[in-house]
Image (cartoon, rainbow, N blue to C red):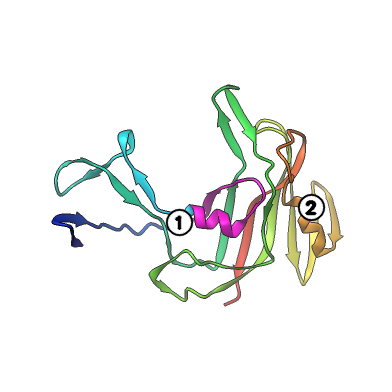
């Protein structure tokens, strides 16, 4: 697609790609909606990140944005809770508090998305317990037959839905062992 901007020709390209999950960056004291907004924000590709333009056969400064065109039946959201810290020469866990709702509507859909108002219900959460990438334990909470169940190795306990809030993360940047939602699974109502 081509369009004119102040005497310049601007090329717009798009590419459809299937996905199994969306990996989203996390920030302190935020929500999954904010994380998804960041996932679909416009990013300028410059310096070493320039885009190779096949029309002019050279690297050009460009803008990139990702939006969802085909909403899946099961939406898996991976929270990027591990970040490489150059000064420490290792990955560290981001135990940031990220609120994730029991119901979710994606707003970062493309203009030509089918059924962009699709509603999702939280059905499972994989939780990381620990303080680093190399150490820790995983548990999960799953909604089954209207009840929330916590699975921890061979132990299964029924929990109150309000317990899910315990896995949002820590309200401050304390570096301590934490229990945080790591992968969220939402199921479409349709």
Q: Earlier in the sequence, mark 2 or mark 1?
A: 1
Q: Residues within 10 Å of mark 1 (few under 14, many from 20)?
A: some
- Residue at label 1? 40
Element type where label 1 sits in the image: loop
Total marks placed: 2
Element type where label 2 sits in the image: helix
User: Relative to 38, is 136 above or below?
Assistant: above
Q: Is residue 131 left or right of residue 22?
A: right
The image position of residue 42, as x and y in percent, is 40, 53
Q: Which residues are magenta?
A: 20-38
Q: Residue, x 21% and y 46% (percent of image)?
A: 53
Q: Quadrant of residue 92?
A: top right
Q: Residues within 10 Å of mark 2 (few under 14, many from 20)?
A: some
The answer to which of 44 and 182 lies nearer the viewer is 44
The image position of residue 138, as x and y in percent, is 72, 44
The CA span between labels 2 and 1 is 27 Å
Q: Is residue 86 magenta?
A: no
The image position of residue 83, as x and y in percent, is 57, 35
Q: Quadrant of the N terminus?
A: bottom left
- Residue at label 2? 166
Q: Is residue 68 left or right of residue 148?
A: left
The answer to which of 29 and 82 lies nearer the viewer is 29
What residue occupies the far front of the structure in this picture? 6
User: Relative to 137, is 67 above or below?
Assistant: below
Q: Is residue 75 left or right of residue 114?
A: right
Q: Are marks 2 and 1 in contact (CB under 8 Å)?
A: no
Q: Residue, x 29% and y 47% (percent of image)?
A: 62
**Residue 28: mark:** none
């Amino acid at each position: 697609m081509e369009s004119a901007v102040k005497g310049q020709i601007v090329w717009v390209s798009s590419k459809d790609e299937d996905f199994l999950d969306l990996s989203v960056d996390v920030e302190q004291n935020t929500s999954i909606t904010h994380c998804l907004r960041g996932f679909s924000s416009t990013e300028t590709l410059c310096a070493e990140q320039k885009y190779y333009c096949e029309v002019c056969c050279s690297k050009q400064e460009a803008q990139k944005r990702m939006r969802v065109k085909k909403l899946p039946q099961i939406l898996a959201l991976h929270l990027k809770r591990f970040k490489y810290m150059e000064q420490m020469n290792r990955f560290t866990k981001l135990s940031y508090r990220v609120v994730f709702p029991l119901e979710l509507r994606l707003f970062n859909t493309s203009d030509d998305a089918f059924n962009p108002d699709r509603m999702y219900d939280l059905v499972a959460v994989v939780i990381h317990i620990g303080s680093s990438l190399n150490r820790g334990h995983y548990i999960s909470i799953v909604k089954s037959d209207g009840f929330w169940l916590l699975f921890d190795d061979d132990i299964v306990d029924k929990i109150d839905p309000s317990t899910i809030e315990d896995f949002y993360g820590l309200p401050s940047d304390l570096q301590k062992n934490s229990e945080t939602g790591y992968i969220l699974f939402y199921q479409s109502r349709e």
